[in-house]
Image: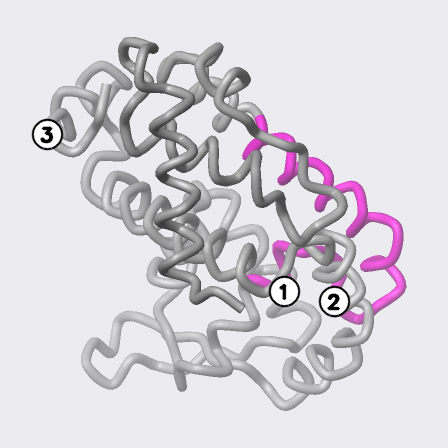
């Protein structure tokens, strides 16, 4: 069997012969699209993306599609969570995302936890209040600032996470289970990159208007 490198070279030779006379198509983006259309995806659920399809989309269109689809995925997950999360000690995905970081950190300030979740202060405060009322979180005096309080995961909170784990696992499977391990790794890497970008904006520029945010991050944006 030919090595992967030999297969790639042969594929590139075929690509060059088909695109040598087509202006603007002999580039890396076109080759990747061509390779994907020829080799295909290991997932039966993936739509084929060939060169002709790729050429129909401008970067502006792709950005708009990405924003719309990312937002839609969040709504899907929210709808799935409503079906079963209410039957667990943890009533919502939001409550889960506020509890899970405290398995890693001994304690956090309320603002730190809210920042991690990207919520407005009022929304995050309401979620924390619910979790305190359920005794899933406990408050303690901040040793560095006696006027402030820090929150930590209580034993009841740990038990709630454990008791909800089966439902949460089902939610994660239905959310992305059609993706292969390789696709999941690619997706996680890209989402982490986006998360770091938006987390910085939310932390440092959340009070700016959209135009001002665009100006402040202009060098990082490929527009």
Compared to residue 47, the image places residue 99 above or below, namely below
On residue 219, the disc is 3
Q: Nearer the viewer, mark 3 or mark 1?
A: 3
Residue 203 is left or right of residue 133, and the answer is left
Q: Which residue is mark 2?
A: 168
Using a 10 Å C-alpha cutoff, classify the residue at mark 3 as few (fewer than 14 neighbours), some (14 to 19) or many (20 or more): few
Q: Which residue is mark 1?
A: 96
Compared to residue 179, the image places residue 137 above or below, namely below
Compared to residue 173, the image places residue 37 above or below, namely above
Percent position of residue 71, x then y? 57, 31
Q: Dot 3: what SS?
A: helix
Q: Nearer the viewer, mark 2 or mark 3?
A: 3
- What is the C-alpha distance between the residues marked 1 and 2? 9 Å
Q: Dot 1: what SS?
A: helix
Indicate yes or no whether the magenta region holds residue 108.
no
Q: Earlier in the sequence, mark 3 or mark 1?
A: 1
The residue sitting at 64% across, 31% down in the picture is: 72
> Label 2 near label 1: C-beta < 8 Å?
yes
Percent position of residue 84, x then y? 87, 57
Residue 60 occupies which quadrant of the picture? top left
Q: Earlier in the sequence, mark 2 or mark 3?
A: 2
């Amino acid at each position: 069997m030919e090595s992967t490198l030999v297969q790639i070279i042969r594929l590139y030779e075929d690509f060059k012969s088909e695109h040598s006379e087509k202006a603007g198509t002999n580039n890396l983006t076109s080759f990747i699209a061509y390779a994907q259309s020829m080799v295909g995806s290991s997932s039966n659920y993936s739509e084929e993306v060939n060169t002709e399809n790729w050429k129909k989309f401008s970067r502006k269109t792709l950005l708009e599609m990405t924003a719309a689809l990312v937002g839609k995925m969040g709504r899907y997950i929210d709808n799935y969570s409503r079906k079963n999360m209410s039957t667990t000690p943890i009533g919502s995905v939001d409550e889960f995302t506020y509890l899970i970081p405290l398995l890693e950190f001994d304690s956090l300030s309320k603002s730190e936890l809210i920042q991690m979740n990207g919520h407005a202060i009022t929304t995050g405060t309401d979620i924390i209040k619910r979790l305190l009322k359920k005794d899933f979180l406990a408050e303690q005096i901040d040793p560095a600032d006696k006027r402030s309080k820090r929150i930590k995961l209580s034993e009841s909170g740990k038990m709630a996470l454990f008791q909800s784990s089966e439902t949460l696992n089902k939610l994660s499977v239905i959310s992305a289970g059609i993706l292969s391990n390789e696709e999941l790794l690619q997706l996680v890497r890209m989402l982490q990159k986006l998360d770091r970008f938006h987390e910085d904006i939310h932390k440092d520029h959340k009070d700016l208007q959209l135009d001002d945010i665009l100006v402040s991050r202009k060098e990082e944006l490929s527009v």
